[in-house]
Image (cartoon, coloured by chain):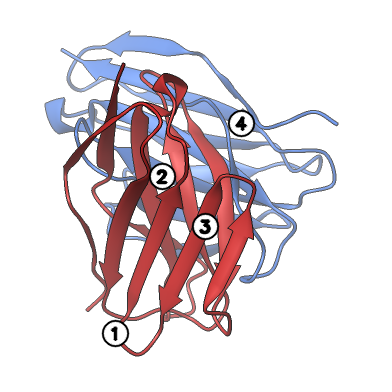
Chain colours: A blue, B red
Amino acid sequence: ETGVTQSPTHLIKTRGQQVTLRCSSQSGHNTVSWYQQALGQGPQFIFQYYREEENGRGNFPPRFSGLQFPNYSSELNVNALELDDSALYLCASSLGTNTDTQYFGPGTRLTVL
Amino acid sequence: GEDVEQSLFLSVREGDSSVINCTYTDSSSTYLYWYKQEPGAGLQLLTYIFSNMDMKQDQRLTVLLNKKDKHLSLRIADTQTGDSAIYFCAVPSPSGTYKYIFGTGTRLKVLA
């Protein structure tokens, strides 16, 4: 059984640029959630995708957007990057209902200069 | 509001027990979780407890839940240097958006 994978591992961008982060869910999971973890903080929920539709969103601006594909992999896109977007971005997959345990990937470390 | 609080640091000697505490304002009636994060890594699921249970034991880990006081704790018996990490409790939001609310994490340092 393959766990949750994310790419790239690290990324450096400059302010104003756009970035795409990728996540492959654990085998058999159809739900993907994205979290942002700033340094020294706990993860903050960005949004969740279930069967290719957005299924809930946290307190993040519209420049944070996502996609989920038919194979349940997912992308997180961030436009007009700001310095405060520097963080570890974590993807979690689950079987699909709100009672299901979320399993996390290793994260993508984004640095915005 | 939705809030989860943890103490920031805990230091114990190898072989002692560690107790990490978490308080929350509200949760959905499902599971509550403990995750472990090592430096530069993602979150590893350690254990969980269903909201209608008071206690769950899983090898060296014991989870206690006081639902009335909205207090969750994780006890690690015979703490080892490999247990040094940041521990997060995660509480499913009661708002129906299927998100977890995380505490700020407790950094556990195990002294040899």
Residue A105 placement (x, y as % from top left): 57, 31
Q: Nearer the viewer, mark 4 or mark 3?
A: 3
Name the residue nearer the viewer: A76 or B3.
B3
Mark 2 highlights which residue? A35
Measured Cα–Cα span from mark 2 to mark 4? 12 Å
Q: Mark 3 belongs to which amino acid? A: Thr
Q: Quadrant of the C terminus of chain B?
A: top left
From this view, report whether residue A65 is shown above or below residue A77.
below
Q: Mark 4 belongs to which amino acid? A: Cys
> Which mark, residue A23?
4
Mark 1 highlights which residue? B69
Quadrant of the image occupied by residue B66: bottom left
Residue A94 placement (x, y as % from top left): 68, 53
Measured Cα–Cα span from mark 4 to mark 3? 32 Å
Q: Mark 1 belongs to which amino acid? A: Asp
Q: Same chain, marks 3 and 1?
A: yes
Q: Earlier in the sequence, mark 2 or mark 4?
A: 4
Q: Residues within 10 Å of mark 2 (few under 14, many from 20)?
A: many
Q: Residue at x 58, y 52 (%)?
A: B47
Residue A59 placement (x, y as % from top left): 28, 60
Mark 3 highlights which residue? B62
In the displayed structure image, the side of residue A24 where residue B43 appears, left or right: left
Q: Residue at x 83, y 39 (%)?
A: A27
Q: Quadrant of the N terminus of chain B?
A: bottom left
Q: Secondary structure at mark 2?
A: strand
Q: Secondary structure at mark 3?
A: strand
